[in-house]
């Protein structure tokens, strides 16, 4: 796994235990999505990795960002309210807030 900071390009996966701050999974239109937040201490911003496991087709991994610390912290606060962020079928309040009407 290689996740580069969207701002400075440093490899955030090199020290994943320190840089990975949270993730959440969801089933959307039959596909699994996993959004993972990585924080770059040098830049003070988040990079978001989206793993898209397609029901029919090849998996895709993309990154987005940079995401400001404030915005990333707000998203991580939503994720923290979920009792099981690894459960793609979870329909708790946090999942519904995070993904909106996209959930299966």
Image (cartoon, helix red, strand yellow):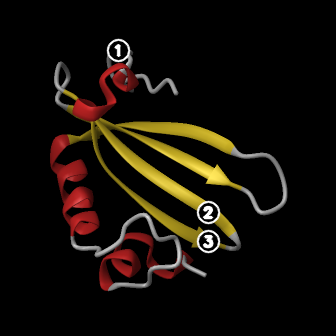
- Quadrant of the image for the C terminus? bottom right
Residue located 45% across and 27% down the image: 3
> Residue 80 appears in which quarter of the rendering?
bottom left
Q: Nearer the viewer, mark 2 or mark 1?
A: 2
Label disc, if present, on residue 10 of the rendered structure: 1
The span from disc 2 to disc 1 (Cα, nearest Å) is: 27 Å
Label disc, if present, on residue 28 of the rendered structure: 3
Q: Residues within 10 Å of mark 2 (few under 14, many from 20)?
A: some
Residue located 36% across and 19% down the image: 14
**In front of the other: 83 or 101:** 83
Secondary structure type for disc 3: strand
Give the side of residue 26 with respect to residue 37, left or right.
right
Q: Which residue, given by chain and number where applicable, does mark 2 sit on?
A: 32
The span from disc 1 to disc 3 (Cα, nearest Å) is: 31 Å
Image location of residue 39, percent across then percent down: 25, 34
Mark 2 touching mark 3, by CB under 8 A? yes
Q: Residues within 10 Å of mark 3 (few under 14, many from 20)?
A: some
Q: Residues within 10 Å of mark 1 (few under 14, many from 20)?
A: some
Image location of residue 75, percent across then percent down: 27, 59
Image location of residue 34, percent across then percent down: 50, 55
Asked whether the viewer can see residue 86, the reply is: yes
Give the side of residue 89 with respect to residue 75, left or right.
right
């Amino acid at each position: 796994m290689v996740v580069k900071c969207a701002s400075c390009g440093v490899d955030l996966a090199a020290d994943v235990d320190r840089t990975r701050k949270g993730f959440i999974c969801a089933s959307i239109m039959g596909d699994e999505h996993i959004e993972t937040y990585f924080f770059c201490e040098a830049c003070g911003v988040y990079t978001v990795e989206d793993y898209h496991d397609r029901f029919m087709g090849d998996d895709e991994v993309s990154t987005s960002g940079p995401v400001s610390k404030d915005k990333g912290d707000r998203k991580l606060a939503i994720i923290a309210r979920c009792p099981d962020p690894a459960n793609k079928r979870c329909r708790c309040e946090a999942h519904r807030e995070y993904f909106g009407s996209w959930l299966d």
